[in-house]
Amino acid sequence: MADLSKMCIHTITTKPWKLTQAVEHYAESGVRGVSVWQDSAQELGPLKSGDLIRENNLEVVSYVRGGFFPHSSKAKRDKAIHDNKKMIDEAAELGAPMLVLVCGAEPNLDLEESRKQIQGGIEAIVHYAAKNKVQLTIEPLHPMYADTRSAINTLRQANVMAEAIASKWVGVAVDVYHLWWDPDLEEEIYRCQEHGNFSAFHICDWNVPTTDLLLDRGLMGEGCIKLDQIKKWVIKSGFEGFHEVEIFSEKFWKQDQKEFMDKIVKSFSDYWKS
Ligand code: ZN
């Protein structure tokens, strides 16, 4: 029997399944954690979704995703703050310890200005997050998304921001898809953990060639990411959290999800043994 004690799945990975189906199949497969995407919590609502997950002996690992702070207009920035507070409320109802942030970027603004607005946005809601016991988790995204999705593109930038805000209610998510190419990744992983900011670890693979810049992530072992090496660094850093499978893939979403689930478990087991 494979060791899946550190295995978590993001519900977006099996997007065609409703939450009830996903939870049933994850539990059956021996998965231990679930990161819940906002869409998948809408049918039952966050409160019942969280109960359902725990009734199936699964742990809610995170709620995905808040953020998108930078905007040229103040009205839009204010709306982002409002929307993020609502996401914090939902994360609290779900029983999620963290809300993952896709921080945002605005093509009309300099990246530097976008980063300032991101930090301002997080600082504006960190007390609210603390009151609700939900951590705000900054996820750096691959630089190909620096136009509209995130002006935070390296682990160093995420570390610098988390250290500047210096709250235990702000952390960092390390996702191999976004960060595998970074020559500073090893040292920044250790730094992240040393400062107490290493909150989440997301895994998948980078397909070669990639056919879509958003919806063509691979299963662990299918692509060119040196996952065994990054996993070693993560474990050496002292990180003890879940290893979260997060795969957006039009190709896999078209397949029978139960068969896909078996492939996920197999690829996770191989990854874990490596
Ligand atoms: Zn991720």
Image: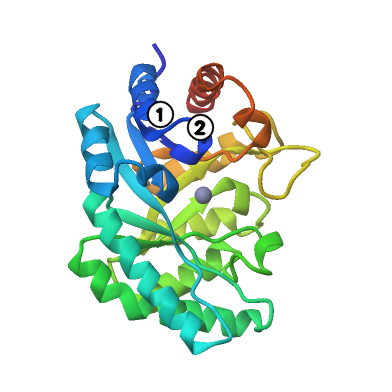
Residue 187, disc: none
Q: What percent of the width, then of the height, locates residue 48? A: 23, 41
**Viewed as shown, does residue 138 lie left or right of 177?**
left
Q: What percent of the width, then of the height, locates residue 84? A: 37, 68
Q: Residues within 10 Å of mark 1 (few under 14, many from 20)?
A: many
Image position of 98 with respect to 159: above or below:
above
Q: CA distance from mark 2 to mark 1?
A: 7 Å
Q: Nearer the viewer, residue 7 or 131?
A: 131
Evaluate if marks 2 and 1 touch, with contact meaning CB atoms under 8 Å apart: yes
Image position of 133 with respect to 11: above or below:
below
Looking at numbered disc 1 in the image, what kind of residue is underneath it? Ala
- Tell me the residue that label 1 is attached to: 22
Image position of 77 with respect to 98: above or below:
below
Q: Residues within 10 Å of mark 2 (few under 14, many from 20)?
A: many
Quarter holding the N terminus?
top left
Looking at numbered disc 2 in the image, what kind of residue is underneath it? Thr
**Viewed as shown, does residue 97 lie left or right of 180?**
left
- Tell me the residue that label 2 is attached to: 14
**Viewed as shown, does residue 40 lie left or right of 71?**
left
Write the residue at 30% across / 41% down.
44
Write the residue at 40% across / 73% down.
163
In the rendered image, is residue 88 in sight? yes
Q: What percent of the width, then of the height, locates residue 164? A: 40, 78
The image quadrant that residue 20 belongs to is top left
Give whichever of discs 2 and 1 has the lower sequence position: 2
- Does dot 2 land on a helix, a strand or a loop? helix
Q: Nearer the viewer, residue 248 or 186?
A: 248
